[in-house]
Amino acid sequence: MDSTGGYHAIMKYGIHRAESSPDDGRVISVGQDNIGDALASRRTGTFMSKPRQTPLSLVGLDIGGTKTHGLRWNGSEVCAEARSGSANVQNVSVETAGRNIAEVFAALGSGPIDRVVAGSGGIDTETDAESLRALIAVHAPGAEILVVHDTRLILAAGRAATGMAVILGTGSAAWGINGSGREGRAGGWGYLLGDEASGYWLGREAVRATLREFNRGQAPGELGRRVLAANKVESPDELIALFHGDTDRRYWAQQSPLVFEALAAGDPGSALIVAEAVEHVCGMLGDLAALLGLDGPVIIGGGVGTHQPVFQDGLRAALDAMGLGDIRFLEVDPVHGARFISDHTALPATAP
């Protein structure tokens, strides 16, 4: 990680301007001198301290594993909101992502757009950012397009310029930035390598716990009965076939509430799953805190992180025991972070 710190992502992925052209519909970059000025002011501690003027028309996108949530601002007022299916190309095809983005922009209304701030999982390389930017550009000709990892939306939605953000949705990841601009990440490797404590992980662990009961010759417990009923199966073979069949991550992530329902009914296996999820989140944040020298704030978002009080209680107690303070569970949708990012990005709203 270089010395330009947390907003190295702006230099790496850039704020780009979508230029409408009858020939090629190109996407071009705003001048690098302006980006360099922004990074220089970030290093002097003024980057996040002086909000820039809000663009006349701003679109924010939160692109998750299950849905895409869009907001449109005119000045300081939200004037339109839209939801569609996921546009994360790690979860859906490029064609499906394009259709879902088009649906969101259509619902947000017509008229010029000055800037788009889009947060999405899986934005790890310039190629990732450029692919998403290209899908957006056709709906926002002439707009600046800033693509960030969705964890940055979480931190910004908590109105924090520095600190650590955790997203616990269909997948999971943590990201942080300290006062000197150094950034770090933990997790966010995708479901084959990680996504611990996510909705998908909880759903998968519920299936595994149910299968272990069958292997031990035990009758299904509270969690097992819920898993079998939710999936309309009766045997372990049916459950295994379903898991490896046409179902996807979103299907199993949507079953994560079964774990908390069974926990409320006294299921000991569910208690172990939730305790392990807490440990995984603490591990991610412990790595970030050590790397960045932070002790807070910690902003937690995503459906699993914001909708399960017993999980929140466990996280708060465990993080407090680690010496991490100012734990905040998002009370607004992450897409609201787009406004904070835009307001505090020291770049012009028009091309130089």
Image (cartoon, helix red, strand yellow):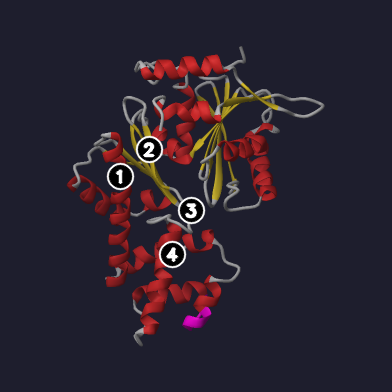
Would you identify the image quadrant in which residue 105 lies?
A: top right
Residue 147, labelled with which disc?
A: none
Q: Residue at x 49, y 17 (%)?
A: 36
Q: Residue at x 71, y 33 (%)?
A: 138
Amino acid type shown at disc 2: Gly
Q: Earlier in the sequence, mark 2 or mark 1?
A: 2
Amino acid type shown at disc 4: Gly
Crowding at dot 1, Cα within 10 Å, few <14 / some 14-19 / many 20+, comes out as some
Whole-percent x, y for residue 79 in the image: 56, 29
Let me know if residue 260 appears in the view.
yes
Residue 198 left/right relative to 135: left
Nearest to viewer (mark 4 / mark 1): 1
Q: Do labels 3 and 1 touch, CB within 8 Å?
A: no
Instruction: Please tell me whether mark 1 sits on a helix, a strand or a loop.
Output: helix
Membership of 13 in magenta stretch: no
Q: Earlier in the sequence, mark 3 or mark 1?
A: 3
Return the residue found at the far right: 23
Q: Earlier in the sequence, mark 2 or mark 3?
A: 2
Residue 190, labelled with which disc?
A: 3
Q: Which residue is mark 1?
A: 287
Amino acid type shown at disc 1: Asp
Q: Which residue is mark 4?
A: 203
The residue closer to the viewer here, 341 or 121, is 121
Residue 238 left/right relative to 106: left
Nearest to viewer (mark 2 / mark 4): 2
Mark 4 to mark 1 CA distance (whole Å):
25 Å
Task: Specify the segment rendered in magenta.
Answer: 232-238
Q: Which residue is mark 2?
A: 184
The residue closer to the viewer here, 69 or 92, is 92
Crowding at dot 3, Cα within 10 Å, few <14 / some 14-19 / many 20+, comes out as some
Instruction: Please tell me whether mark 3 sits on a helix, a strand or a loop.
Output: loop
Residue 41 left/right relative to 31: left
